[in-house]
């Protein structure tokens, strides 16, 4: 289920073990990302690339600020 | 999500690039909308004053010249309603050219929510 959340909730969920996925391109990710985030560019987001995520834990995806 | 503009931690090759928030003056004098110019002037002398609400959301800016008028006038009458603002995570080298071109004397650093972070004097 998709839910839009704000940064305060993101911080709470990270504390509780949520996984962070930065869906920007690799170059943007390398320049700057939220600590602990992994990079799966949006165009590469599929069953195979997301297989390393733990389906039992929440997954937070983010793009640029505001998105 | 407004993580970076809120000044929260970041990782990556650009993580240590100086940002506007790193050079912004903190502890900038503030006043409330309902105050009178004379009272504010007595408190801050010749410094810019940021007009904020109870949550420190920026409502306006009063430059030193704005405090030279009628002491009985309200802050609301002299404040700049649209001060130049930057977000905390803006790289210093990316400060918009127009602020230099138009000789902006004071700019504010605010979060996405409009909360005051500090003051920049470009």
Image (tube, coloured by chain):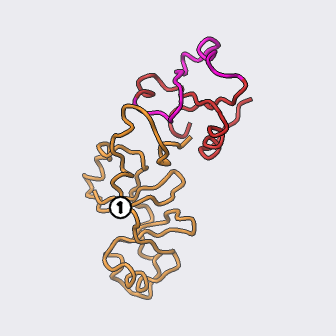
Front residue of this view, candidates A47 and B13: B13
Residue at image coords 55%, 68%: B53
Quadrant containing the C terminus of chain B in the rendered view: bottom left
- Decide: is B39 above or below B63: below
Q: Per the image, is A45 magenta?
A: yes
For residue B82, what is the image quadrant?
Answer: bottom left
Palette colour of chain B: orange
Quadrant containing the N terminus of chain B in the rendered view: top right
- Residue A29 in the image: x percent, y percent? 45, 27
State which chain is coloured red: A
> How busy is the neighbourhood of tag 1: few (under 14 within 10 Å), some, or many (20 plus)?
some
- Residue B91 in the image: x percent, y percent? 35, 43
Which secondary structure type mostly characterizes the magenta part of the structure?
loop
Bounds of the magenta span? A31-55
Front residue of this view, candidates B63 and A9: A9
Mark 1 belongs to chain: B
Residue at image coords 62%, 32%: A60
Q: Which residue position holds label 1?
A: B25
Residue at image coords 37%, 82%: B41
């Amino acid at each position: 289920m998709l839910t839009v959340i704000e940064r305060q909730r993101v911080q709470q969920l990270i504390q509780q073990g949520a996984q962070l996925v930065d869906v920007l391109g690799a170059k943007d990710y390398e320049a700057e990302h939220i600590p602990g985030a992994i990079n799966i560019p949006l165009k590469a987001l599929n069953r195979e690339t997301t297989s390393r995520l733990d389906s039992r834990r929440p997954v937070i995806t983010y793009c640029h600020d505001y998105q | 999500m407004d993580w970076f503009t809120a000044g929260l931690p970041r990782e990556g090759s650009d993580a240590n690039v100086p940002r506007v928030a790193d050079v912004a003056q903190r502890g900038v004098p503030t006043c409330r909308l309902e105050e009178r110019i004379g009272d504010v002037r007595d408190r801050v002398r010749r410094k810019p004053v940021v007009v904020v609400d109870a949550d420190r959301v920026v409502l306006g800016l009063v430059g030193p010249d704005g405090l030279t008028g009628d002491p009985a006038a309200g802050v609301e009458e002299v404040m700049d309603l649209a001060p130049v603002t930057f977000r905390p995570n803006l790289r210093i080298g990316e400060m918009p050219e127009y602020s230099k071109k138009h000789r902006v004397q004071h700019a504010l650093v605010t979060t996405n929510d409009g909360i005051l972070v500090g003051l920049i004097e470009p």
